[in-house]
Image (cartoon, rainbow, N blue to C red):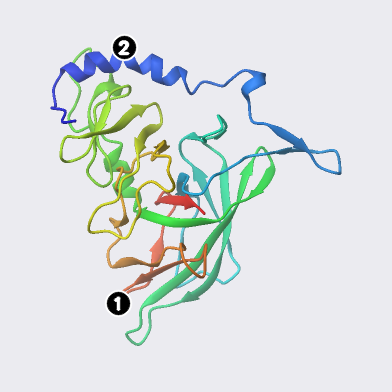
Amino acid sequence: MSIGRGRGFFCVGFSLAFTVAACFLPLGSAAQTTVSRSSGGQSQPDFAIPPGTIVPARLNQTFSSKNAQAGQVITARIMQNVPLPNGQRLPAGAKLAGKIISVQSAANGSKAKIELRFDSLIIRRQTIPILTSLRALAGFMEVQAAQTPEYTPGFGTPYDWVPTRQIGGDEVYGVGGPVTNPDGERVGSAIYGGVLVHVRARPDSSCRGPVGEEDRLQALWVFSADACGVYGLNRTEIAHAGRTDPVGTIILTAEGQDLKLRTGDALLLRSR
């Protein structure tokens, strides 16, 4: 369905914002994350994270191929509530943890390389195993640009109604409004803290669209529905996304320079 751009979206956005946002308010005790008891009597969250679940995150530290060490712990913060098919959600603010596996500095014309993996999800002091691959990587300046309105709102116009452009090109028409791709087709809706969209595969990319039979709405934060690859990080490439052997291992390379990732750089991860 093709959707034009216009001021009418702002009015629609106002009425929809509260309806959409209400869906993501804390649920009652009967519908909250289920909990199982371990043999030691401690509560353990029993999250069922199906393969193909998108997890948008932001790095918590800076490291590079020049100074990083194998075995170094790395962490990232989940930036948007991630809905799960069973009614649970991974909350924004939860932490992903992992480590650097190996590092190769740029020297004698060779590529710089960092191998890393995220394998733990920490929610309310509980650790849950998770295996992820990398769909997209973006520099913090790209993140900032995606969160900046395309024009200054006029007097009386709420800031949240002004359109923004996602990393990858999708257009967001304010909180509660539609998200459309560059062809004007609606792919989802905007909510407070991000977007809920149907993941798509670009014909020229190696990234997949929906995994399995269910084409559900997913949390992509500042990324477009078909975001894939590297944005805003000069000469950096995803040499291995972690989808195939070695599964879960992400390999990044940089040509002719040391590879550097900074606090605030964005990751679009996908569960295995």
Q: Nearer the viewer, mark 2 or mark 1?
A: 2
Q: Is residue 169 left or right of residue 135?
A: left
Q: CA distance from mark 2 to mark 1?
A: 51 Å
Question: Under tag 1, what secondary structure?
Answer: loop
**Residues at discs 2 and 1 in contact (Cβ within 8 Å):** no
Amino acid bearing label 2: Ser
Amino acid tagged 1? Gly
Q: 178 left or right of 43?
A: left
Where is residue 2? Give x, y as percent.
Answer: 15, 31
The residue that label 1 is drawn on is 256
Task: Tell which of 228 and 79 is nearer to you.
Answer: 228
Residue at 40% in and 20% down: 20
For the point 28% across and 18% down, which residue is it? 13
Compared across the picture, whether 135 is left or right of 201 comes to: right
Residue at 43 percent across and 40 percent down: it is 214
Q: Residue 190: where, in percent of width, then height?
A: 33, 28
Position of residue 217 relative to residue 68, above or below, is above
Relative to 86, does residue 202 appear above or below in the rendering?
below
Disc marking residue 15 = 2
> Quadrant of the rendered structure where residue 183 is?
top left
Which quarter shows the N terminus? top left
Residue 9, position as x, y percentages in the image: 21, 20
Q: Residues within 10 Å of mark 1 (few under 14, many from 20)?
A: some
Q: Is residue 221 above or below residue 107?
A: above
- Foreground residue among 193 and 132: 132
Residue lying farthest to the bottom in this orientation: 108
Residue 266 position within the rendered picture, expressed as x and y whole percent measured from the top left: 40, 49
